[in-house]
Amino acid sequence: MTGDQQNRIVKVATGERKAELVFKQVRYVNIFTNEILQNDIAIQDGYIAGIGEYEGEKEINSDGILIPGLIDGHIHMESSMISPLEFAKAVVPHGTTTVITDPHEIANVAGTKGIDFLMEETKSLPLDVYFMLPSCVPATGFDESGAILLAKDLDSYYGNSRVLGLAEMMNYPGTIHLDDTVHDKIKQAKSFGKRIDGHAPGLKGKELNGYIAAGIASDHECSTSEEAIHKLSLGQWIMVREGTAARNMEALLPLFEAPYYERCILVTDDKHPGDLIEQGHIDYIIRKAISLGADPYHVLRMATYNTATYFNLQNVGAIAPGYKADITVVNNLSDIRVEAVYKAGENVKEIFNLIARKDSLLEKSDLEKDDVHLKKNGKHRYADIYESFRMNMLKPKDFMLKNKSKYTRVIEMQEGEILTNERIIENLNGIDVDRDLLEVAVIERHRCTGHIGVAFLNGYGLKKGAVASSVAHDSHNIIVVGVTEEDMCIAANQVFKNQGGLAVSCEGQMIGDLALPIAGLMCNKSAAYVESKLRILKNIVRSLGVNDSIDPFMTLAFMSLPVIPKLKVTTKGLVDVEKQEIVD
Amino acid sequence: MTGDQQNRIVKVATGERKAELVFKQVRYVNIFTNEILQNDIAIQDGYIAGIGEYEGEKEINSDGILIPGLIDGHIHMESSMISPLEFAKAVVPHGTTTVITDPHEIANVAGTKGIDFLMEETKSLPLDVYFMLPSCVPATGFDESGAILLAKDLDSYYGNSRVLGLAEMMNYPGTIHLDDTVHDKIKQAKSFGKRIDGHAPGLKGKELNGYIAAGIASDHECSTSEEAIHKLSLGQWIMVREGTAARNMEALLPLFEAPYYERCILVTDDKHPGDLIEQGHIDYIIRKAISLGADPYHVLRMATYNTATYFNLQNVGAIAPGYKADITVVNNLSDIRVEAVYKAGENVKEIFNLIARKDSLLEKSDLEKDDVHLKKNGKHRYADIYESFRMNMLKPKDFMLKNKSKYTRVIEMQEGEILTNERIIENLNGIDVDRDLLEVAVIERHRCTGHIGVAFLNGYGLKKGAVASSVAHDSHNIIVVGVTEEDMCIAANQVFKNQGGLAVSCEGQMIGDLALPIAGLMCNKSAAYVESKLRILKNIVRSLGVNDSIDPFMTLAFMSLPVIPKLKVTTKGLVDVEKQEIVD
């Protein structure tokens, strides 16, 4: 708020000046008293100036109930597979006006340039995007990621008012055993007075005490209410997560009761485009919680004021004088159907219409929509982001297994899980479709090393062709699974040509793809476009035989993440996650 | 917390290292879950390291209940009339481990040197003293105070981690009518992300909205629950005050209910030495609230965690890993009798014993106790504080009224109030003891101006002698009331000779005094000493005829404060507070 803004706001509040906008005699949720009140609400310069009797240049009547704009306390925006602008278009109409994002995925691809890109691209949206700095890039020592982030790389970000702290500290062993690189980051965040988020599923006892004593202030991995209440009683804030991959809300319903709810926050962690379209965002969690019997005022606090409090965001998360005029209008407190959204006092519909008009002007000047980010001097303005693949075209022989032996370890997928088992097969001489023994490969794509890890996978079900993806946690190399080396090579090369995304090949031909050229993770098209493309690709892959119990792309994306047991494949080969070592 | 400390704390938490101190299987109040839990609590380096099963170098068993160290969210320490060390000796045994003070009184005498003095003197106490910077020095344009503080004078303090914001903004007209000197201070505090406390009794409607929209985040002047709940619903935090001069707790009992209590804080504002000894401090408010039926967990939150949250003091106000080991042991949750206090993990009894031993060593070396602050090069180390009077000895004729007229305005005191009325008396030719028309004078004592305002006072009841004091809000000039000019002169000169304090004279002789040489407001003696001296002086004054319904010193101290209606006397003469002008 500038000095001039503040002066105008105070003048409107005292009645010395007419407000820009007044909601006349509207019902609104008072987040401090847990009740619905009715009054005029005066808006000036993007802030709520006064609540009482006011006149406005523009006056709005509404039958709906005004609630504070919703806040997602923890999300990886990249999981939506769409650009920040498209993400805003998808979530803001659902009442979300603020998100706290951890750019962990793009940072694993492009390091600080990835963070810079997201910070830049979220600067002027009708959505406030705050950042928690990725704490674990790369996720493990086995990962060949696009970057390594140390405390010194993060230092300059803490001066930015949109940076709220250090994101989910997944490295709990490093935290409690005083690993220097981990503690440098922890001490740094604390020295700036910033928050440190946690991520420690099931941690308890002395290890949990050590983790909390080190300064880890929250947890979003609780899957039982006992675990959550215990962590809360030791001082952690609990982020109740309900996203696409992990859904803990129902198990955590007891946390919606007083006094627990006062230190609980709603988060999604990740949200795929289909879910955003079909379900909604934070409004969906609120709706579901209320339908399960939670107190609506408690739920709303967990989606607004509590989140702002935890992140020390003053003047956000309530409808009161001096607060940002981030307001969501809902039909009632049971359906929570969003009727309108005001970001800093402006109707977001009008903002998005304005953006669309600007886009169409750009289209008229013959610019490709994907090329809004203009190339300069022949080089893309965000070359490191839009041309993030550093590798050579692959040949089928690159996928040949070098060492053959009598016994072969095979990754065994589990129904509906991202955990895997290890299985030993005797006298395996190559891909065996009848026994569902496919080849899976991870191709290093950040530094032209030529590293390719090849292994066998059981349980995917593919009968023909190959499936490739550059969304492959957490390093986002190319993962490809297939029935022949030729098809694997074709699919993987297509992902490379597209500078990221998904690709499906069959019998020597490409049969479907989705380009995700923003760091190999996102595209500039709408959520609806990406969702329909994804649906088509999933149908194609299922027609090639993939098991119904498996999400063909999401589950595949976790087969390369060497922090989730038991056997995973990386660019360096098979990793036994429990032993934390490379195995033959 | 240093890096080494943090490492040791984490090691203790994980069990890798033995704790310095462990409370074995103690009951403690969990401030996050509103319940009593039982467990081992391990302390290391002044912090709570872990809660579970721990071993310590030293182990303590206790039948009491551990609660977080208590916090006073708003006090003027000077009101205790004792030095910071003596203040700590008085309040810490009552379970207080943190206070947020507004050095408004000493700043009116000595400006930034007064603030510096209090910051220095509170640096090494077993009590954390945080500061809110005085916002209104002087209180009005009529005041001849010892200093004028502008935003530029406050700037350098905001870098200090013990400075939490801008203290009670009493100048609400300046706030809502955009006075530049006021808004410079408001904008400054906001630019540093710091809190601004409020002080606006009875403010409502558009004026209240303007005051809150300007950024005033709290109020400690609510005298009805309707006023408090209304302010709270507009986003202010409510400080429930129960001190010596103002006692609002009983009227605000509804605020102790959920959800209101979550944004309420217990404060004293001011606390005289007698009250500290007889009643206690924050423990007294807790005890009283519980006896009136308030939920003990709610009350405790308002005295610990809520206060820390409002002031953004992380790691204070709860018993949990990583929190400061500020712990008060009470017998139960109804009596709240304090059995022991641990400041940063150390028993305060031992700390005070250590201080006493040091003091006695100093005594042996023949140093006067008042002279612990050694003179250097012939000048007192804190000359501006300990020799704060800049005036000349007075003569009886200085007290003569210059202008006589047919009608005389008289200040009429009200029983039990600090408000006054105006009364017009005809043909008054001087002091008239029979009609209780005494002379009252305020003598400028900061800049040798020789300004003396003289007026008549009704309702005090003195029959003989004179009473003088340098505790005279807010400028702390010398106020003196008397039956003869000679006695007034003797009493006022005694205050000057003592470099501050109270003095009573009668028939040409001094008959009692209390020296307050620290800025004319405080002394280095104990609360018990000051209290007994005060009691004797009050008895003397009552024996001279002062009405029982009037506190002879406290009420007198407000007769010179030109912000409380109706008629007050200043160094410049009579002020009509409502009209805000000097009158004959």
Image: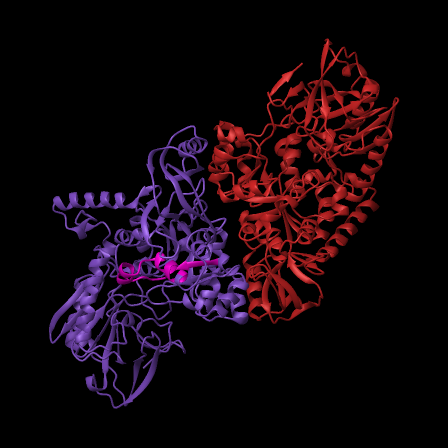
Chain colours: A red, B purple
The quarter in which the N terminus of chain A is drawn is bottom right
Q: Image quarter for residue A240?
A: top right
Q: Is residue B544 left or right of residue A479?
A: left
Question: In this view of the protein, can residue B402 be seen by the observer?
Answer: yes
Residue at the spot 19% in from the left edge and 43% down from the top edge: B357
Q: Nearer the viewer, residue A27 or B2?
A: A27
Q: Image quarter for residue B170?
A: bottom left
The quarter in which the C terminus of chain A is drawn is top right
Residue at the spot 63% in from the left edge and 58% down from the top edge: A325
Q: Is residue A51 left or right of residue B425?
A: right
Residue B355's place in the image compared with A354, above or below, is above
Q: Nearer the viewer, residue B320 or A498?
A: B320
Whole-percent x and y of residue A162? 58, 45
Read off the magenta span: B264-290
Q: Is residue A211 left or right of residue B462?
A: right
Whole-percent x and y of residue A306? 57, 51
Question: In this view of the protein, can residue B134 be seen by the observer?
Answer: no
Residue B40's place in the image compared with B200, above or below, is above
Is residue B287 rendered magenta in the image? yes
Is residue A477 rendered magenta in the image? no
